[in-house]
Image (spheres, rainbow, N blue to C red):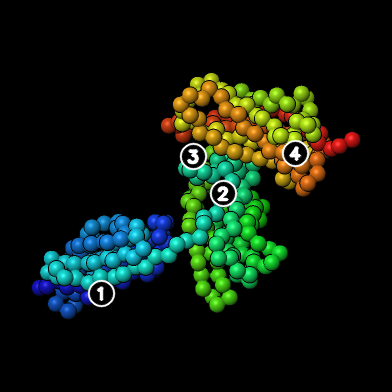
Amino acid sequence: MTDTISSVTAVPSSIANDGTEISVVSAVVLTDDKPAAAGVMVNWTTVGGEASDVSSLTDDTGTATIQVTAVEDTITVTARTGGDLVGKSAVISTYEPLTAPLVINATADDDYTLDHYDINFGVQAEIPLFKGIKLNEQITFYWGEADSVSQIITDTNLPPFIIDVSHALSPDCLKDGIYDVYYVVKDQAGNYTSSSKVKITVADGGQTNPTLPAPLVAEADPYINIADADDGVVVDVAYPNMAAGDVITLYWIGYDKAQRKIDDAYSSSTYTVGDTDSSHSFTIEKDTFYPLGSGYEGYAQAYYSVMPAGASVLQLSNTVNCLVDTVAP
């Protein structure tokens, strides 16, 4: 009996050239012109891509599969058996994806993870201005399979677009799990182009008792006024046993005198501690004190979280309240 490769197919036949998309390559094996039984070894050679396996076994339909990601512009995948040393091949083309969306507080420093305090702060994603943009194209933003939202590009509605994941999308988006976050652009002819994907991990973890010192805001004495805000307000963070590789996330949230959170009066940023650091200074930019272009009277809360290097348990600081008055008399 001779096992021969009848066909090799790749689905999809075109994938992103940045290694973020997978093509499933299937080889159909015949044994003396009949579908092969389960367990026939298929050997794979992949040029221009990375394959999940160099060999795989047929299933009960006589089909063996592997997964392939791109390394070069064109990928050739060849399947052979012990009795068919020539085999057959499939060619996978690639395309350059659009720039990936950004997710606030999810960075390479924290393995693109959103914790309890990121979620409590508010989750936003940004679709950046991308090359080749055209009017009347439709952009659809996807948070995995949990939810999506679309809008049309017009001369008054151009990227960057901010997606309020916390409020504009389904609560399912912020349940613990891993989500492919990306967007797709469709032109008027129905052609699609996808962005690179960001794999976001949501790990709420719940409330943590504050154990670290509150950040220091020297300019809150007690008010942050117009002069203080003019060149940004410095927030100093220092805590015991600070070590290289710790990931610090600072949160700054502005409230009015009625204790209502003010849109655009909040900020957050992340820093990875270096070898010689014993403290770190963050700067809250001037615009944070002028939401929607005007000053406000109220206060701001500042606190930070720390994911110690090599640890999996988040630490939290105490909170400092800072009076704010950036309204001219």
Q: Helix, strand or loop at disc 4?
A: helix
Q: Helix, strand or loop at disc 1?
A: strand
Q: Earlier in the sequence, mark 1 or mark 2?
A: 1
Q: Mark 1–mark 2 contact, CB under 8 Å? A: no
Q: Quadrant of the C terminus?
A: top right
Q: Mark 1–mark 3 contact, CB under 8 Å? A: no
Q: Mark 4–mark 1 contact, CB under 8 Å? A: no
| Residue occupying image coordinates x 50% and y 49% | 200
The amino acid sitting under disc 4 is: Phe
Query: Does residue 141 appear in the picture of this structure?
Result: yes
Does 161 sit left or right of 289 as displayed?
left
The amino acid sitting under disc 2 is: Val
Whole-number angstrom distance, CA of label 4 to CA of label 1: 64 Å
Whole-number angstrom distance, CA of label 2 to CA of label 4: 23 Å
How packed mark 1 is, by other alpha carbons closer than 10 Å (few <14, some 14-19, many 20 or more), is some
- Look at mark 4 in the image and give the residue it sits on: 289
Residue 7 is marked as 1
The amino acid sitting under disc 3 is: Asp
Front-most of 60 and 217?
Answer: 217
| Residue occupying image coordinates x 46% and y 31% | 245
| Residue occupying image coordinates x 76% and y 44% | 291
